[in-house]
Amino acid sequence: MVHADEIAKLCYERFNQLPRRGKPEPGREWTLLAAVVQITRCADTDTVKKEVVSLGTGTKCIGQTAMSPKGEILNDSHAEVIARRGCIRYLIQELNRAVSGGDSSVFCQADQRGKWRLQPGVVFLFFTSHTPCGDAAIIPMIDSLSQPCPPVSSVKSHKENDGRGDLKRGAEEPSEGKHIKLPRLDLEDGGDTKQSLLPNSLKSEDPSQSPSAKTPGPSDSAGCLAPVPDVHRTGAKCVSGGPADPLHPGLGYHSTGVLRVKPGRGEPTRSLSCSDKLARWGVLGFQGALLSHYLQEALYFSTVVVGKCPYSQEVMQRALVTRCSHVWDLPAGFSVCPPELLRSSLEFPFSQAQTELRHQAGQGRISPCGAAISWCNVTERPLDVTANGYKHGVTKKALGTAKARSLLCKLELFHSFLSVVAATDPGALPDSLRRTELKTYWDFKEASRLYQQAWQQLNSQAFPLWPRSDRDLLLFR
């Protein structure tokens, strides 16, 4: 049995063990954290080992014009995506060990030629310190006694886009009533905390005394504003071609159950929301197209644990499970595999809410941390700190070189995968990798035939509006 608080504690402790580089400035910067935990049950000794194998932080993604046709830039640096890509690095390392005849804690040989499967007793679990952006974040604002923590408000700096194609992810925003204009929060001028600037209906200073967060409604018979139920709002935008957000006051502000792209003030992004990506992983697996060449079955997260934050079990179920639950006719090795959804009572110390509580006058405006951290359980270069899609601190002169590339970018992961192919005995190669015409990243992804068939079924039955990848951005080698 998985205990949510135990998983959260394990992930926060792993974060605390990392060096200072890339971490938020306490009391002024906040970030989000996600992690992949490997759980290994040993039947012989009746023991269970829980280990963080990948951890990520981050809140940003790049604009579409900054995307690289060479695969050199990290497009999406949201914590959930960083954690999953770090897990891919870990899986590639373990697969390399397996095909080279070494011991792997993850993989053992499967029945089909050139195929591998998980070791008996091994499962993977996903943790995120905050509800994923997009559909899972459109949560009704209810009495704070029923919420794991007070509603999280967005604190925006003057510049949401720093001019380098780098777009910020705010924690999902609580609604601001159409009839109320909230004053600008300017903590540099020595103002009190944001709680004192919010209307009473949005204050949550004491969870035991806080009223429900509501959008002001029509006046009642006494001349007072009658409360109208409201929702936490997401900055992720509906994909084009589908329903748009009605933007009505209260519960009617957002469309629900729709695909969304991550927000950008100014230039749009091409990155789908983390809610959408988690839902997709529940059908296609989180291993991706490349590793699917070697795997007899897709890899699924058995459980998704969310840290202390505004949360709704019903909304999480809708966003991550229900949207894809009807998908059928999937190829061998793929299935609809909904995770168990759990929430923890432990809050990430560098969450936006905790940062606001710890902020002191003179520290400047509260803002998202500009860096993203990846740590994964690999022997070589486990730590990767990035900003704006490149290595943290890299100079302009180094752009376009290996020195500037994140270890998580498409090109680096592709080269790591090719090292597995090179290490595989030619007679033990999977059938899908025996074609001599495979040259580019695009070629190898398309040749993963069963994965592409599964994606076609998911695309046609659940996500027909999912934007197609630009082939010209995937022709690198």
Image (tube, helix red, strand yellow):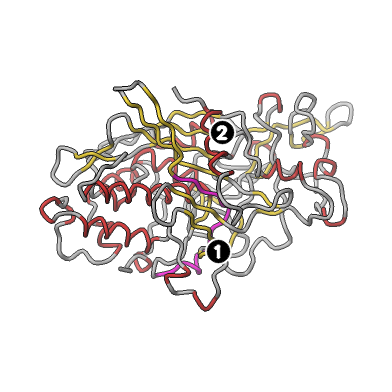
Which mark, residue 9?
2
Q: Is residue 287 above or below residue 157?
A: above
Q: Where is residue 420? Give x, y as percent.
A: 25, 55
**What residue is at 28 percent from the left and 44 percent from the top?**
454
Residue stretch in magenta: 54-69
Left or right: residue 337 compared with residue 66: left
Tell me the crowding category of disc 1: few under 14, some 14 to 19, or many 20 or more residues within 10 angstroms, Cα based. many
Give the camera-side residue of 87 and 210: 87
**Image quadrant containing the C terminus:** bottom left
Q: Where is residue 392? Give x, y as percent.
A: 55, 64
**What residue is at 70 percent from the left and 41 percent from the top?**
353
Q: Amino acid at mark 2?
A: Lys
Q: Where is residue 189? Give x, y as percent.
A: 87, 56
Q: Where is residue 88? Give x, y as percent.
A: 37, 49
**What residue is at 71 percent from the left and 45 percent from the top?**
355
Left or right: residue 31 compared with residue 75: right
Q: Badge 1 is on which residue?
A: 392
Q: Amino acid at mark 1?
A: His
Give the camera-side residue of 142 and 217: 142
Confirm whether the magenta stretch covers residue 204. Answer: no
